[in-house]
Amino acid sequence: MTRLSDRETKSSREQVLHQLYEAAELEHCLMCTYLYAAFSLKTDADDGLAPAQLEATRRWRDVLLQVAIEEMGHLVAVWNITSALGGAPRIGRFNLPLDPGALPASVVVKLAPFDAATLQHFIFLERPAGSDEADGEGFALERAFTRGAPGKRITPMAMDYDTVGAFYEAIGQGLRDLVEQWGEATTFCGDPALQLTAAEAGLPNAARVICSKTALAAFNAIVTQGEGAPSHVEGSHYQKFEAIRRELAELCAQAADFRPAFPAATNPVLRSPPRAEGRVRIEDPTAVAVVDLASSCYGLMLRLLAYAYAVRSGDADKNLSIDLAIGLMHALVPLAELAARLPATPGSNVNAGVSFIALRDAAALPPGPSARRMFCERFEQIADAAQALAAQPHARAKVANEVIARLAARALAEFDLGATAPSRDASTAPAGTAAAPPAGAPATAAPAPAAPTAPAIEVVEADDMTLLFEGKRCIHARFCVTGAPTVFLANVQGPWLHPETLGVDRLVEVAHACPSGAIQYKRKDGKLDEPAPPVNLARVREAGPYAFHAELVIDGKPAGYRATLCRCGASKNKPFCDGSHHDVAFAATGEPPTTSQTDMLPQRDGPLAIEPQRNGPLHVRGNLEIVSGTGRMVSRVTDVRLCRCGGSANKPFCDGTHARIGFTG
């Protein structure tokens, strides 16, 4: 064994974990600041902006939200590395604004509404190494100081760094030191099944870390996409913010009175702070209720994420806690937008804003019945507060109430404590059941379209088989009219199905080629009907739908073995594809990148449950191999959320875009 004296100049596991905790705090804080600025933007038609200005602010909001989602992906990557080293991820953080010392003096983090100074601050935080970008006005460091202490210490000490890229390089070197000392297997001694994956969370960069190669790749992805990326990297956060800066300057030059955001408070607080300087206390009763509810949703979301890291993949509690945490993120959006539109104090010209209050300790609850009890009790409290707030004439409060009521009902039902779901104004029906829309609700609260009536199924008998055709599932792939032109007569008046003109074995082959499942059959010659496939597959079609081949159960109902499901968001026959991707010129690759989730599944067949989440993704449970249009492996999963709004930046996986674009379905 390597002796301590031989390791005096090397990083310790404790020191690397200490640095990872700071990295998690940093990513978490940046995510909150980007969200706060996004929620302050004016995005409604009656917000007093000219059409071109409104189009720009909506686009900027989308960019900020996408960057925040990517920061969440960075955070999950840091959590996964922490777990891989045998540590418990740092879920919590310090409350905002950060006091000096939590991060280097040059990294100032506080909540501020969107304006030119805040945007410049974001650019400064995301600047490449060697950049001369200045910080935004009003974001000057409180005092200059240097962290750390001279001499060798075995007590973990914080380090200073000029850019976040340099910080991650230092952590990467610490990982290399550990591997040099202990080897790969001993260094990465954590249980990989405790980590979160893109398939489970629908977040970019969420991949299992099992060795130094995967850990360093995660660091590289964080830096290349975000803080410290080289200035030439296309799509980096730096480039995205720089593009907004140029457009903002152009619009301000055209109209000097252009105000793209509401006057949300800088550093809002709900209680009297030890230092009142630079903070705005929220006192308006409605604003207090909104921010209080938003903070409670945020805190419960953190608890659920921490719990997910204490439970192994495949456990129902892990899947449920992730689902509920993602749902709370969606509930937080309308509350945060409403807070930025309400006065901080009665009659004030400064508005409130969601404060992202952190729990004193967000560590994982011990897995089991006590944790489930805690979650259910908390959901009931939050749902009661949401229902009371929804009685006020604010459409966004009604949207939040509807989301929270469904989450509370699901928590009580699926954590299985024998409790009864609370009776609330909003629907507490299972996912997939449409709720009555709240009066005056914006587009994001629009109810799911009514389920289409059962489509007519044409049935034609022949001597050796019964041919069935379900027209509403047809996507006109033309395998039928080209493979069996005497059976399927295109563009004719009257009867068009003639199974008697082709041998049953050949007609069965044509039916099996139909990707939509519109063609079904029943044999009369004693041979078996269509069997379940030996491997469950979902093919990602170029600029088109998902083509599933498995023993399908869609929205709780058996659906055969073949189906094409919409991923453009435009189908009028959701969840099935109806060809609308052609009408809307949907552009999406059929060759998405391969994820790290490619290990062979212990079982590759079996029932595949597909649940279209209301106004959200396809939640798929069961053994599934996702492949590209050419058959290349993309991912092997047992629980995944697939985008069906058409907007995800991480296609085919959901990244939460459906919530911010108002997808309904």
Image (spheres, rainbow, N blue to C red):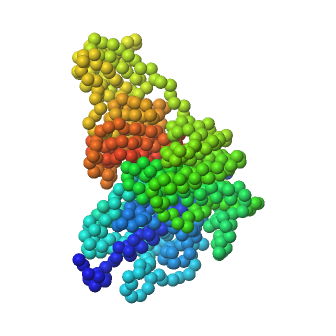
- Number of marks in picture: 0
User: Which residue lies at the image location 66% right of the left edge and 60% below the top edge?
Assistant: 352
> Is 132 placed above or below 55 here?
below
Quadrant assignment for the N terminus: bottom left
Nearer the observer, 200 or 576: 200
Nearer the observer, 192 or 223: 192
**Residue 51 visible at all:** no
Residue 149 is situated, as x and y percent measured from the top left of the image, at 44, 85
User: Which residue lies at the image location 26% right of the left edge and 66% below the top edge?
Assistant: 185
User: Which residue lies at the image location 63% right of the left edge and 42% below the top edge?
Assistant: 423
User: Which residue lies at the image location 57% right of the left edge and 43% below the top edge?
Assistant: 420
Nearer the observer, 44 or 337: 337
| Furthest-right residue in this view | 347
- Direction from residue 391 to residue 488 in the image, left or right: left
Residue 494 is situated, as x and y percent measured from the top left of the image, at 40, 11
Residue 195 is situated, as x and y percent measured from the top left of the image, at 38, 58
Residue 576 is situated, as x and y percent measured from the top left of the image, at 43, 33
Dividing the picture into quadrants, the one containing residue 478 is top left
Nearer the observer, 182 or 380: 380
**Residue 614 visible at all:** yes
Dividing the picture into quadrants, the one containing residue 440 is top right
